[in-house]
Amino acid sequence: MKDRLLRNPYLRQLLRDPLVLPFYVPSVILFLGIGIMIPVLPLYAEDFGVSYAWVGAVLSAQALGTLLSDLPCGLLLRRLGHKRAMLLGMGVMVFLVIALSWARSAHEAFVYRLFSGFGVALFGVARHAYISERASIANRGRAMALFGGLMRVDRLIGPLIGGFIAAASGLRLPFVVAGLISLPAIACVVLFVPDRETIETRTSSEPESRPSGAPLQRVLRRQAGVLIPAGLAQIFVQMIRSGRDTVIPLYAVNIIGLDVGQVGLLMGIAAAVEMLMFMPAGWIMDNLGRKFAFVPSFGIQSLAMAAVPLTGNFAGLLACATAIGLGNGLSSGGMMTLGADLAPSDTRGEFLGVWRLIGDVGGTGGPAAVGFVADALALPAAALTLAAAGMSGTLIIAFLLPETLKREPTSTAEQRSVPT
C-alpha cells in the first residue's frame, strides 16, 4: 500500500514528513474518541447511583493509572522504541474504552479506567519523545501548539458527537463508538512510524559522554532544581485543566438543570473558541517566550472558573466555559513544549516519564478534588478550589519558573522537518 501511495508526488512528500502521518494523524483520531466521552463520563458514572466522590473517582481513575505507569513506561520506552510502545498503548486504551460499555457498577468502571491509564501513559511518553526528537528548537512551540490545536478540534467535535449519541441511544453506546473510531489511528502507526527504532539505539550514536548511574537517577539528580518549581506549577494547572471537564457538566446538570445534549453543545462551543487559539499560542511561545503564553492562559482560566458559581443559566455557564477554553487555548501544547525544553537528550524517555508523572498528579487531583469538595461542601465550592489551584500555578510560573525558550542556529533548525 505504501509503495502505491509513493507514486503521487504530493502524497510522497506527505509520507516523508516525520510528523504528519506518524504523529499528528493518529493522535487526532485517537483523541477524537476521547472527546466523545467528555460530556458522557460524569453522567455515566453518576448513573450508577453513587456519590459525587465516586463520580470523581471514576473520572480520575485513568489519570491515577497513568500516574502509576508513567515512570515504568518511561523506562520501557528505551526498550520498546516509539512504534511498539505506541501500538501497545493504543491497543490497551481502545479495548478498555469499549469495556466501559458493559460495566455493571462504578467499581468495575473504575477498574477499567485505572488499567487504561497504562495505555495512556505508554502512548503519551512515546508520542512526546517522538515529537521532541523531530521538532526543531526554533519551531518547537508551534509544532506542539499545532498538536494542541488538533486536540482541541477533537474537543469541539467529540463532545457534540458524544452528546448526540448519548441523547439518542443512552450513556453506553458512546464508548463503543469512541473505541471503534480509534482503530484507524493504529493503522497509521503500523504503516508510517519507522520500525525497530529504540531510544537506546538512537542515543547510543550521540557523541556526548554520559554520566554514571541509572538513567532515572541521573534525571532526578541533575534536573531537581528545575523540576521542583516547574513540576509544582504543572500539578496546579493540570488540576484546573482536568477538573473543568468534571465540574462544568455536573454543575450544568445538577445546578442549572441542563440535559446531556445541552452539555455537549456547551462543551463543543467552548472547544471551538479554544481551538482558534493554537496558532497565536505557538507564535507567542516561539517568538516572545513560553511564560508570555502560560501566565495569561492560566490566569484567565482561574478567573473564569471562579465565576462559575455566579452563573444560573445556559448563557452564563457558556460564557465561563468559553473564557476557560480561550485561556486554555493560549497554552496549546504548552506543557509538552516545556517538557521538551527541559528534557536532556541522553535520558529523554526517563525525563518525560517523570514529567508526565508530575502532570498526572494534577490530572488525577482535578476530578478527585471536584468529587470530594462537592460531597463535603457543594459544587460551587469545588469550582472555587480549582480556581485557587489554577491561580497558584500561574503565580509559580510568573515568579519562580525560568524562561525556557532558547534559540538554535539556523543551519541546525533547517536540517529538521517541522510543520509550519
Image (spheres, rainbow, N blue to C red):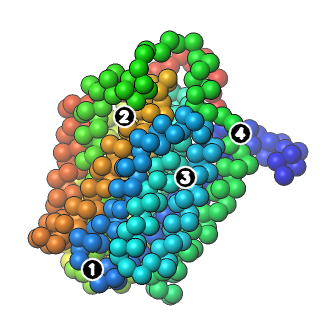
Query: Which is more toward the observer, 349 or 281?
Result: 349
Q: Residues within 10 Å of mark 2 (few under 14, many from 20)?
A: many
Q: Residues within 10 Å of mark 3 (few under 14, many from 20)?
A: many
* Position of the C terminus by quadrant: top right
Q: Position of residue 401 (x, y in %)?
A: 26, 31
Q: Residue at x 42, y 25 (%)?
A: 214
Q: Residue furthest left?
A: 377
Would residue 47 appear left or right of 400 to someone viewing this image?
A: right
Give the mark toward the camera: 1 or 2.
Answer: 1
Q: Residues within 10 Å of mark 1 (few under 14, many from 20)?
A: few
Amino acid type at circle 1 is Val
Mark 4 → mark 1, Cα distance in angstroms = 46 Å
As helix, strand or loop, the secondary structure at mark 2 comes to helix
Q: Which residue is mark 3?
A: 89
Mark 4 → mark 2, Cα distance in angstroms = 34 Å
Amino acid type at circle 2 is Arg
Q: Which numbered circle lies on residue 290?
A: 2
Query: Which is more toward the observer, 414 or 357?
Result: 357
Q: Position of residue 46 (x, y in %)?
A: 31, 79
Q: Position of residue 309 (x, y in %)?
A: 17, 69
Q: Which residue is mark 1?
A: 50
> Visible in this render: residue 144?
no
Amino acid type at circle 3 is Gly
The mark that comes first in sequence, 3 or 2, is 3
Amino acid type at circle 4 is Asp
Q: Quadrant of residue 231?
A: top left
Q: Position of residue 164 (x, y in %)?
A: 49, 80
Q: Which residue is mark 4?
A: 195
Against 79, residue 251 (above or below) is below
Give the mark toward the camera: 3 or 2.
Answer: 3
The mark that comes first in sequence, 4 or 1, is 1
